[in-house]
Image (cartoon, rainbow, N blue to C red):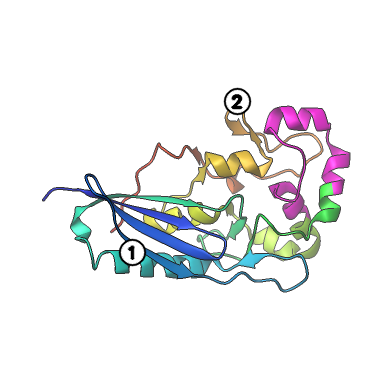
């Protein structure tokens, strides 16, 4: 049987969107599923990664009522960056994600700004220290949730989490890496020991992939 369809999934801030694409006709089916943005305190922005997975599965099941599942060639996943998902050694989320628009780490951003050479930081990462960087949020977690930090085996983003659930493979897409403040954008490698920043265990950061390098199969 000919393989003719590709699914596209986007993990957005307030909803998951999915489409089925035909080689000749373009979009042949689409679906959207809402998910909840959590804000337990002013300035906080969190979401439940398990809800992303639930809406992903529901969206795929809906799409394959329109197209034959056996004719799906691949699935592409995109999403908001850099959401921060903490996984334990078995790949389970340890807490809600800390979103890219979360503002709890204002003090930690100032700490990072004071700790690094700002020109060097910009040269390496392509940006200045800000609340979207992983480092300030990690500093906040070390101060306020040290038990979670101690149990964290892997860091990943929103769509990386969905890719992991679809394939069982941990990875970090390069766009997430570039926005994280932990990545050398010229050398295309993790720069997690930048002077003045938090020290990350190498195993916390999965292999980096480019958006057009992998095809993920759904079974």
Q: Is residue 155 left or right of residue 119?
A: left
- Measured as percent of width and height from the top left, residue 111 is found at 86, 47
Q: According to the image, label 1 marks what residue?
A: 60
Q: Which residues are magenta?
A: 110-139
Q: Residue at x 75, y 65 (%)?
A: 145
Q: Specify the farthest residue to the bottom.
A: 40
Q: Residue at x 69, y 33 (%)?
A: 125
Q: Specify the farthest residue to the front.
A: 25
Residue 58 higher or lower than 10, as above or below: below
- Measured as percent of width and height from the top left, residue 3 is found at 18, 48
Q: According to the image, label 2 marks what residue?
A: 187
Q: Residue at x 69, y 57 (%)?
A: 101
Instruction: Assess whether residue 25 is covered by the magenta stretch.
Output: no
Q: Main secondary structure of the magenta part?
A: helix
User: How many other residues sit within 10 Å of disc 1, few (<14), some (14-19) or many (≥20)?
Assistant: many
Quarter of the image for residue 61 reads bottom left
Pointer 1 with pointer 2, Cβ within 8 A: no
Do we see residue 95 in this rendering?
no
């Amino acid at each position: 049987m000919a393989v003719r369809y590709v699914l596209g999934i986007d993990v957005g801030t307030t909803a998951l969107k999915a489409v089925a694409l035909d080689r000749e006709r373009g979009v042949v089916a689409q679906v959207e599923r809402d998910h909840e943005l959590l804000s337990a305190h002013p300035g906080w922005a969190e979401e439940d990664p398990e809800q992303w997975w639930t809406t992903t599965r529901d969206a795929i099941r809906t799409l394959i009522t329109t197209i034959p599942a056996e004719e799906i060639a691949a699935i592409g996943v995109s999403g908001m960056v850099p959401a921060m998902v903490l996984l334990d050694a078995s790949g389970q989320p340890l807490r809600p994600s800390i979103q890219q628009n979360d503002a709890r780490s204002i003090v930690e951003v100032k700490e990072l700004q004071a700790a690094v050479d700002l020109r060097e930081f910009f040269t390496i990462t392509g940006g200045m220290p800000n609340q979207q960087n992983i480092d300030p949020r990690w500093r906040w977690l070390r101060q306020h949730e040290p038990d979670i930090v101690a149990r964290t085996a892997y860091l990943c983003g929103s769509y990386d989490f969905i890719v992991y659930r679809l394939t069982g493979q941990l990875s970090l897409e390069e766009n997430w890496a570039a926005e994280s403040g932990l990545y050398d954008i010229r050398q295309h490698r993790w720069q997690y020991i930048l002077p003045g920043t938090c020290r990350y265990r190498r195993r916390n950061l999965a292999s980096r992939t480019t958006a057009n390098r992998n095809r993920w199969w759904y079974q």
